[in-house]
Image (cartoon, grey):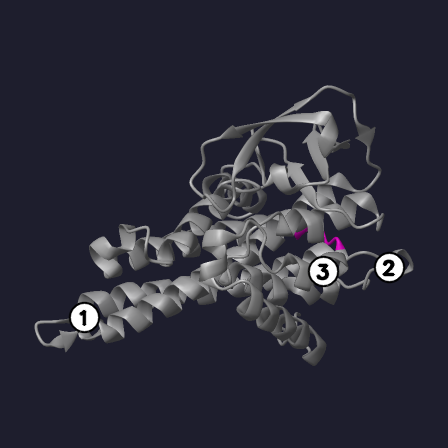
Amino acid sequence: MMDAAFSADQLALAANVRDVLRAHCPPAALRSERRPGWKQLAGLGFFQVLSPEEAGGLGLRLIDVVPALEETGRACLPGPVVETAVVGAYLLGGAEPVTVAVLPPGQAYAADADLADLIVVVRDGAARSFPAASVCLSPRPGPDPGRPLFEVTTGTPGEPLGGDVRAALRAGVVATAAQLVGVARHLLSTTVDYAGARTQFGAPIGSFQAVKHQLADVAVAVEFAAPLVWRAAVTADKALPSADRDASAAKAAAGAAATLAARTALQVHGAIGYTDELDLRFWLARAWSLSSAYGTTAHHRERLRAAIVDGSPRRYP
């Protein structure tokens, strides 16, 4: 059985992160800064929350930081948040805090590699680290200007990392799913507000049945995805046999919810949703880019299907 209620400390961490991001990562900062709010979050110790206490971290569990990770998605915080605070903590073992970019298996490009002090490349089940100065980064096109992609060319063998690579990538999947829930929550809230204010034929468009149904579908998808993320964080912390399955369920549901939220937001806002002047574009792009990070929604649905049927054609294992 799982207690789905977060503790006061877990919620307090999320509230502190939310307050910092409201003050230092407003939409205006997304237009003018590459990494707004990072200095202030570092001052909170946010990027070392999962590092052991003996290494100067907070020694928290993944479930402890899920609400805070949702807040980074809600604020559309740029930069390698999951890579630095989560994957790096698992693989570097609480070493000197650095900004980390990760090139996961199955992906051709590393996001936010231009901001990293250290780049981790995972191939064939092993992880190697490369100082940023030792690699060549080539920009590649992507859907999210706030999360640019880079092809990484290494000229040295790199340093092997001894952490649990599978656990680190699993935590990265769950943390990304948490961010997607935050992105979806912001898109839903923004769209509901717009639908209540925008009028057509003398009535708010939010009063139209078709718009109500679209927004209700998004709300259901988000409320369905969030508990799956929480469960995945718990099973990942405990390294339970279902941890990989739960991580894929969380990522698939969160990715689908964020994508639906983005599509609905774009439809409800109409032509204005496409404009560069509207802040909505930042969250649309983040929903699309994070949905593909650490495995696409389709990839994780396939992993989930395989886990459920255990590789046999039977419906139930």
Taking the view exactly as shown, the residue that stands out farthest to the top is 155
Q: CA distance from mark 1 to mark 3?
A: 45 Å
User: Residue 172, position in %: x, y?
Assistant: 64, 48
Q: Secondary structure at mark 2?
A: loop
Closer to the chain start, of discs 1 and 2, is 2
Q: Residue at x 52, y 64 (%)?
A: 226
User: Residue 156, position in %: x, y?
Assistant: 77, 20
In this view, the mark in front (1 or 3): 3
**Residue receiving disc 1:** 209
In this view, the mark in front (1 or 2): 2
Q: Residue at x 42, y 56 (%)?
A: 257
**Could you tell me what secondary structure mostly forms the magenta stretch?**
loop
- The magenta span reads 239-243
Q: Secondary structure at mark 3?
A: helix
Q: Is residue 193 left or right of residue 199?
A: right
Quadrant of residue 283 in the image? bottom left
Residue nearest the observer in this picture, 193 or 29: 29
Residue 246 appears in the rendering: no
Q: Which mark is residue 56?
A: 2
**Residue receiving disc 3:** 42
Q: Secondary structure at mark 1?
A: helix
Q: Residues within 10 Å of mark 2 (few under 14, many from 20)?
A: some
Q: Amino acid at mark 3?
A: Ala
Q: Amino acid at mark 2?
A: Gly
Q: Is residue 1 left or right of residue 142?
A: right
User: Residue 209, position in %: x, y?
Assistant: 18, 70
Q: Residues within 10 Å of mark 1 (few under 14, many from 20)?
A: few
